[in-house]
Image (cartoon, grey):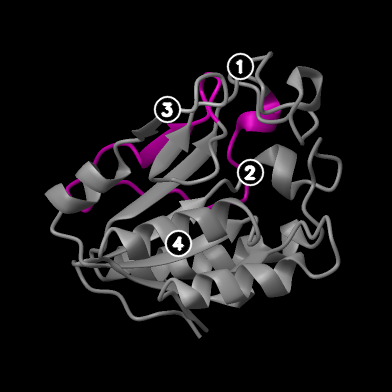
Amino acid sequence: MTQTYTTTTALVVVDMQQDFVAEDGSLAVPGGPEVVPVVNAEVRAAAAAGAPVVYTQDWHPESTPHFESGGGLWPAHCVAGTGGAELVDDLLLVGPAGGGEPLRIRKGVGSEDGYSGFSETDLADGSTAGTGLRELLDAAGVRDLVVVGLAGDYCVRATAIDGARAGYGVTVPLAATRFVALSSDDDVVAREDMTAAGVTLV
């Protein structure tokens, strides 16, 4: 069952990109392909209600402290302009209710970690900056968010928690995400963290 949407409830679709979703992606999330039809159902429901739909994308340079090669945690993934950075072909893309291109927030474009759709921390100097997502949502009169996509223990978690801290009512449908789970309890910890921040898990 999809969530209930109004014009003041936005759907944030997090990082449904080839490198995360496809089984041969460079940072494939287990069960990623299973999420696509679930996310598409949420997109259809949101679009039918005239709710804003925003898509986030990792959009990294070839060299960044975010990658193992630069001292980070992750293999190279979602490098800007490559096929791996593109949204998956089967993902339903919708533009604003008045027409136009789908709304996108690209993150991690420099030396930032790029986990949250709302903010980034520059791994080179420790500074934090917004991505423009909050301004976009506030301009549309959004009060509540539904956050879906990948991965539940990283970018979905960070986006949902930042959204709650910004004052939005945030819901994460667990059927519409999957977890990397580098450690066996990462999914449990992520759920606890989201719940503690005031995020509703369904």
Query: Distance between the Cα atoms at labels 3 and 1?
Result: 18 Å
Name the residue beneath numbered marker 2.
88
Q: Which mark is residue 160?
A: 4
At label 4, which amino acid type do we have? Ala
Decide which of tag 3 and tag 1 comes sooner along the chain.
1
At label 1, which amino acid type do we have? Pro
Q: Which residue is drawn at 68% across and 13% down?
A: 63
Name the residue beneath numbered marker 3.
127
Decide which of tag 1 and tag 4 comes sooner along the chain.
1
Residue range corresponding to the magenta coloring = 83-112
Rate crowding at label 3 as few (under 14), some (14 to 19) or many (20 or more) other CA atoms within 10 Å.
Answer: few
Q: What element carries label 4?
A: helix
Callouts 3 and 1 close, C-beta under 8 Å? no
Nearer the observer, 98 or 14 = 14
Decide which of tag 3 and tag 2 comes sooner along the chain.
2
Q: Where is residue 149 in the image (x, y as percent from the top left)?
A: 57, 58
Callouts 4 and 3 close, C-beta under 8 Å? no
Q: Is mark 2 on a helix, strand or loop?
A: loop
Callouts 1 and 2 close, C-beta under 8 Å? no
At label 2, which amino acid type do we have? Val
**From where the camera sits, is residue 171 visible?**
yes
Q: Does residue 108 show up magenta in the picture? A: yes
At label 3, which amino acid type do we have? Ser
Q: What element carries label 1?
A: loop
Query: Distance between the Cα atoms at labels 3 and 2?
Result: 31 Å
Quarter holding residue 162: bottom left
Q: Where is residue 127 in the image (x, y as percent from the top left)?
A: 42, 27
Q: Which mark is residue 61?
A: 1
